[in-house]
Structures are given as structure tokens and as C-alpha cells.
Amino acid sequence: MDLFEHQARELFEEHGISVPRAEVTDSPEEAREIARRLGGRVVVKAQVRTGGRGKAGGVRLAADPPAAELTARQVLGMDIKGHTVGKVMLARPVDIDAEFYVGYVLDRAAGRFLAIASAEGGMDIEEVAATRPDAVARLPVDPAEGVTPARAAEIAGAAGLPPQTVDTLVRLWGVLVREDAVLVEVNPLVRTAQGQILALDGKVTLDDNARFRQTRWGDREPAPEDPLEAAAAARGLNYVKLDGEVGIIGNGAGLVMSTLDVVAGCGARPANFLDIGGGASARIMADGLSVVLSDPAVRSVLVNVFGGITACDAVADGIVQALDSVRPTKPLVVRLDGNNAARGRAILDERAHPLVQQVTTMDGAARRAADLAHAADAA
Amino acid sequence: MAIYLTKESKVLVQGMTGGEGMKHTRRMLAAGTDVVGGVNPRKAGRSVDFDDRAVPVFGSVREGIETTGADVCVVFVPPAFAEGAVVEAADAGIGLAVVITEGIPVHDAVAFTAYAKARGTRIIGPNCPGLITPGQSNAGIIPADITKPGRIGLVSKSGTLTYQLMYELRDTGFSTCVGIGGDPVIGTTHIDCLAAFQDDPDTELIVLIGEIGGDAEERAAAYVRDHVTKPVIGYIAGFTAPEGRTMGHAGAIVSGSSGTARAKKEALEAAGVQVGETPTGTARLVLARLEAERGH
């Protein structure tokens, strides 16, 4: 889960990292009050979980409280790369003497975290790394040791950062470990004209798998913006909305991703990713079908199940129950293969629902679902 | 011979007395696995009856190893206890720990993979279906009855795609199939398995299944180019996955321009690996290649 900038700022502050004074709001009137409290002149920053916000006009300077209100009014509701701005953060501007980059990222290949630091902060670090690799220091962090002051001094030294950044590097590691983050980044970390080190902007990605021990996260996770994703999340389904017209339901992340690809290979576009997982119950199948069928863009649905642990007759029972509770209005193509496939197919044959067709191969089923979607479009 | 797991392997199950542990221990035994014990400090000294076999429960992995000579453990414990289970197994000197548990925090996986490696314990997983050497032994949750022994080696991030390929190629059969798991941090990589299959006289051809996220497949492609002389057939899932969205597996995410299916496919093809368009197409490539190799 990616945090908003203001949430990252809060976490940094809790861990003793210095941040500029700032407040967050969704109301232009309140923005005026906040600006007054912060001393008049403020930076208004759109809160969106995507990069390139500055270039898109989501970061603006306001000279006084009335200007802050006006600016907040303009920025709130803006669309930045498909993200609607719901909140703005107002921060007291700082006099910047130097800008740095510091962060910890997961090195998947090495199976550990990597410290990344650069004396050239403020820009896109991937761009700096691509054009001037020497300007970016990368040092592995031993998971048993963590970032000690000595290791932090090595990181700062390798990147050419001033010694005052060592404390921030140690505290930022504390954010990563204690908050179960998989990425923390401060960009820029600045030295002010007064010589203070401040985290001006930051990014934090929390590990969804650590939710069971990070109970505070409940208040941080916004409901998905897409109504279908929100409905799926409410039912505990592993669903991602896509742009196409063939609804997809399958078991296992790899097989579902593969199903999307095979449908795309047949010239149709998948409408969603939906993994009902291993040993899916009739209820999950029914919930999944109801979400997929409620998508107005869906023209046909492909159910692709390979029975490994799951027995296909149980899946077929689930589909039959779902047919009675959901009452589909769009054609369903079902492919069952693997364990007890013959019994599963017989159950669907017996139900003989007019909108349900069975195809025994994955490629054939994808082709049929794509054809049905095209036929529905033509009709 | 196979890789990592043979009929000689003696298997302990951590979490055997839980629901999933019971269900899959029964299946492992049915597949011929020599399950020599379970581990649960609260039930130590008892035994669990699985059809015709009583499997003892030990108080610790160490006790299980000392009593039975176990060299493999399969971990079914919940995510919060997985790190402790792996550390215990590594401390006890187990050779191979297969971590089935899904949903383990990344920091825990980083810690226990490093800890195990330093002690000479190989980890497979986490968030994986385990591995099977058909006809000999099955450590994990892969269905044993959808395929048969043969000479294809398979390594995959995805469980269901593994099953799909095992089933499509059931008449040809497999030496060993390894599900390495879909998490960002895993103990055994595609490369580890490629190296093991290359050295395994029972493996004639290798199937490599990958998916979006990270650059493990690109690294594997470079390894194939430099070190693998056996034929390798690939498959990659996730061409239609949108950027920035996690697709089921915690590690399956395209970040910016990195981790895309296209880059992985191109890297594999550049290394001389044929990549199938669909799972079925991949199976066809395998059969054609085997026929061509055997015809020579």
C-alpha cells in the first residue's frame, strides 16, 4: 500500500525525522485558515499517489491566505495521471541550500534492502541513475545488522552527503523496519539556509502482508476509487478492474494472468483480473460472478479453472449455485480441467443453463469468450 | 536422481496438526513421500494416524532430526510464526525447508532467507506450492496424480501454471517440478533450479515459467545463455497486467518500465529460449523440441 505524502510525513515525524510544518485539508476555506496558522506564505501540494505531480501543476506557491484558498480550490479535484486530488497539504516554504536523495528499496534479486543515496536530490532518481550512475550510491544493508550510525556514515560518505544526514539515515531505517515498509524514500532531503536537515517530500510503501501486526493501518487505507473494485474488496475478492469487455474468473494468480493474456491474444480485451484462489467455495464463485456481471463493460465471461487441489466437481457445484443466485444476463464460457473434470462437466451439462457453454481447452475457451464478446458488440 | 527431493528424502511437517497441514500430509503420504514426523511443542509425544500410517509428533525440529534423520521440512504454519519456524529448522541443521505459507511480511522473508543461507539450509518459497519428484516424493501441495515420472524439469513462480503444464505434459512426465513462489523475496530462484536441472542426468529438457515483477527471468535468461546446454522452453504470464497493480501474487507487479512480461520474453528469446504464447502452446513447443532432440 502506497501512502500519501502527508501520511509519510506524519510517519517521519513520529520517528524523529525533521519535517516542515504542514497541515492537510480537503476544503479551500480551511486552506486559508491553515495558511494563516503557518505564517501566510505556503506551498500547496496535491495529495496523489503518483509521481510527476509537480510537472502536472499539483505543487504551487501561494503568497498569502486568500491566495492559498484560491490555489487549493484549483488544485482540489484536479486529475493527475488518472488520480483525482482529494486533499491538499499546505506546508511552510523553506530556504533550500542543498537537495539530497535518500531511500531504502528492496533488492529482490539479492533478497535484502539496498540504501540508495545521492547528493543530487529533487529530481527523479531513476533519471539520475540512468544518466549519471556515478552520482547515485547503492549500498546493501545486512538484515541482521540494519543501518547503524557507522553504516549510515558509510552511506552518506559514498553519496557525498554531509555528516548531518547520518541521523536521518538511521531514523529512516527505523521507519522501514518498525512500520513494515518495503520502500521509504525522502526526495528531496534538504539542508536549509539555516543549516537544518529537513525531509521535504517522501514516499512510503507499506507491506500488505504485515497488516496482521500493523493494526494502525486500518485508518490509512482508502477504499478503492473504482466502484467495482470497492465492491470486490468488500467481499474479500482478489480483483483488479481493467479496460476490456471479457470478464475473467480463474483460480491461481499465474493462471488468471495467463488467461488475460490468452484472451488478449484472441483479439479481445480482458475486463478484469479475478483470482478465486485454491479450494474456492460456491460462495466465492457466486460473489465473483456477481461482481464481474455487474460490470457494464462486460460482454461475455470466461471461467477458467484448473483443478489441482481443487476438485472440478466442487467448482461446478459452485457455478450452478451462483447461476441460481446471480441470474446472469451475459454468456458464460466455462473451462474445467484437471481433477474430477469429467464430473464437473457433467454437473454443468445437467444444469443446461442456456447462457453457459463449456469448452474443454483453455485456448478454445478464450477464443469462444472473445467471439461472444465481439458478437454482443455487433448486436 | 531428480533435484532437491528423492524417494530417500525424509520429511518433517511443521504445522502438521493444523487443518492444511493434516490435509496435505495425507496427500504427501499418498504420493509416496516418506513423512517421518510432525513438529508441534504442544503435542509432542503423540502421533497422528493417516490411514495406514501413524506419524509421530516431535517437540522440535531438532528432536525430529535426531530421532528420524529427517533432511527436509515442509512449513505450513501461519505467517506470524513462519520466521520462527524457519529459523528453528535452520538452527537444527535441516538441508531443505519448503515454506508453503502465503502472506509472510517481506522483512521476515529477508531475515529468514539470509539466516538460512548462512547456515547452509536451502529455502524453497515462501508462498509456493512446494516441489514434487513424481513417483518418488512430494513436499508441499502440488497434486501428485495429474502427471507421472519423466524427463522434463520444471521451475515456476506460479502454482496453477505449474499444475496446468504438468497436466498438459502428463504423458511425457517430469523429473522434478519446483514451485519457487510468487513473493518478492524467495529462497530458491529460477537460476538455482536451472543449475540443478543442468546437472541432473534424469532431466532432458527444462521448462521455465515466469511472470511479471522483478528481473528474475532476465537473470535466468543470462544464466541459460552462459551455463545451460539442455533445451529450455519458457512461458511468461502477465502481458496484459496494468502498471502499478499487484496481480494476485505479492511479487507480481510492474513498476514503471521494469518487470514487464515483454522484457522477460525478449530476454529469454535473446538467450535462445523458445517462449510459448499460451500454456498449451508452450506444452506443444516442449513436445516438438523433445521429438527433435530424440530424433538426432
Image (cartoon, helix red, strand yellow):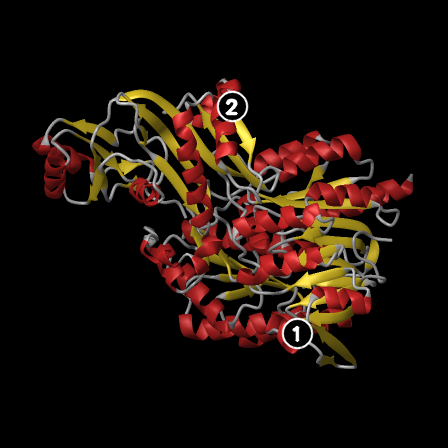
Closer-to-camera residue (A31/B47): B47
Instruction: Give how far across and how far down residue A219 sits, in percent.
Output: 31, 56
Local crowd size for mark 2, using a 10 Å CA cut-off: few (<14), some (14–19), many (≥20): some
Q: Kindly identify the residue that appears in the image at 78 percent across and 49 percent down.
A: B153
Mark 2, secondary structure of its residue: helix
Residue A85 in the image, given as x and y percentages of width and height? 25, 41
Dividing the picture into quadrants, the one containing residue A23 is: top left
Q: CA distance from mark 2 to mark 1?
A: 52 Å
- Residue tagged 1: B22
Q: Amino acid at mark 1?
A: Met
Relative placement, left or right, of B9 versus A64 is right
Nearer to me, A193 or B117: A193
Q: Which residue is mark 2?
A: A158
Drawn side of residue A124 relative to residue B180, left or right = left
Q: Is residue A286 above or below residue B169?
A: below
Quarter assignment of residue B21: bottom right
Give the secondary structure at mark 1. helix
User: Against A344, is A228 above or below?
Assistant: above
Mark 1 — on which chain does it sit? B
Between A133 and A49, the one nearer to me in the picture: A133
Mark 1: give few (<14), some (14-19) or many (20+) Cα within 10 Å: some
Q: Is residue A345 above or below residue A124?
A: below
Occupied quadrant, residue A162: top left
Instruction: Name the residue: 82% across, 39% down.
Output: B230
Which x, y percent locates residue A279? 57, 68
Q: Are marks 2 and 1 on the same chain?
A: no
**The one of A257 and A215 positioned closer to us in this rendering:** A215
